[in-house]
Image (cartoon, rainbow, N blue to C red):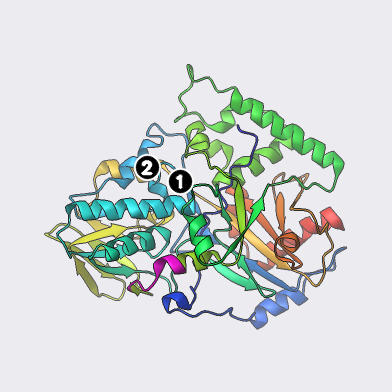
Amino acid sequence: MSGRKLNRHDFIGGAAALAAAVGLGACRVPFSSEESTLLTSLPEYGVPSPNAYLRSNWSQDPFALCSYSALPPNPLGAEARRILAEPVDDRLFIAGEATSISAPAYVHGALESGLRAAGEVAGVAAPGASVVVVGAGAAGLACARELVDGGFNVTVLEARDRIGGRVWTETMDGVPVEMGASWISGVTGNPLTPLAGQNGTRLIPFEYELGFTDQQQAAEGRRGARQLQRAIESFDQGRMDPATTAVSSLVPDRRSLGLQWALRYEISQEYGVDAERLSFEGYGEGEAQRGGDALLDGSFTGLLADAAGDLPVRLESVVTAVDYGGTGVSVRLDRGEEVNADHAVITLPIGVLKAGSVRFTPSVPARKVDAVDSMAAGLLDSLWLGFDEVFWDPDAEMIHWIDPERPGLWAEWVNGYRAFGKPILHGFNGGSQAFRLARQDDGAVVRSGMAALNSIFG
């Protein structure tokens, strides 16, 4: 364990209506009366009540069904990603963060996978061939842009009424807030960094500073983090298989409160799965991110909008079946229409692939099915809360807390005041705790988050 937090928050589910740069003007939908009633019916706390909220819930989203992929203990290990990425019969190509070896679960990993798939298509396709790209996320947009620029006839099919894939920007108190991608992780050499420069988006360096308000909890959390680090360092390459060894097996069965918190904070909220469902290989996969991480003083979707340009995207086109058994590819939509092309690039999230929401004819090779089955669909959900005033340390980068009954529940909050100058907090939950909250309604989630803040500051 490196001692720094390997931020995977820059790849969580959702999509946003993109700006007019791609001809899709967007605005924030006002709160419904039901949402207003929720806020006014909250119990009294020892801290101010919120005036606005935004919640992600990606496991319940039929076009995501997860936040990003993870590697549970499985004999295939990271080879599953390579297998999933393999083209089928030079007609079917696969992209998306789950196929990335260098940066799985990252936006730039998805983007690079789209460029890789575009290169594979160009290597076998006739000049000017038709290509249908399923999904208008980072992978699909990058792939389509490269193919269009290469002279191919491209159609992008997107199930949502917006593009962006698992990137989603909303607005709160006049500033963009990210429901999906939030950080650029490893700004040095990251293809997203020059995109930010080109559209004038300022990057805000982020250090993941521990921000406990209670000194006893701070000491407990640091002890737990050190225990987890020692456990990770105890991995014996000679006796243990990194692909089949669960991170949890390296940790003592009797766990202090701080260690329980560290497992949730460092594992569940990084990889979207608990330590029991993350292999040691999954913990260490991906290239080291260089240059530190940064928040965006602007819209993450704006970066994708600029990269997409005027791509031909068909919105609200839900793909239900892909037939690649003939000389080309036929893609069927839920309304019965078929879109025919010479080749297809599939960029569906791992959660959708695992659910079998799209039927392939003929069935994809068994080894590819095994690869999908061997991966986990992780979950990291977030909650934004807006307030009339700042009641926390305005200079804190983050706020951390250990729930004595559920260590790791609302373990971290990002201080939106320091980042954006607005009284906003951004809280996270990952793994099994996120899945538990996903089954609850908005009111229950907001009350849970407020109860945590009340315990910290009330």
Question: Over which residues does the magenta segment extend?
Answer: 306-312
Report the residue at 70% width, 34% height from top: 225
Residue 431 appears left or right of 237: right
Q: Quick check: 373 above or below 323?
A: above
Residue 153: give x, y in percent of width and height: 22, 68
Residue linked to disc 2: 81
Residue 104 is labelled as 1
Quadrant containing the C terminus in the rendered view: bottom right
Residue 414: give x, y in percent of width and height: 70, 56
- Asked if labels 2 and 1 touch by Cβ distance under 8 angstroms, the answer is yes
Q: Quick check: 71 above or below 129?
A: above
In this view, the residue in front, 439 or 61, is 61
Label 1, label 2: how far apart the Cα atoms are: 9 Å
Residue 321 part of the magenta-drawn span = no
Q: Looking at the rendering, which quadrant does residue 1 occupy? A: top right
Mark 1 Cα shell of 10 Å, populated few (<14), some (14-19), many (≥20): many
Q: Looking at the rendering, which quadrant does residue 415 occupy? A: bottom right
Amino acid carrying label 2: it is Arg
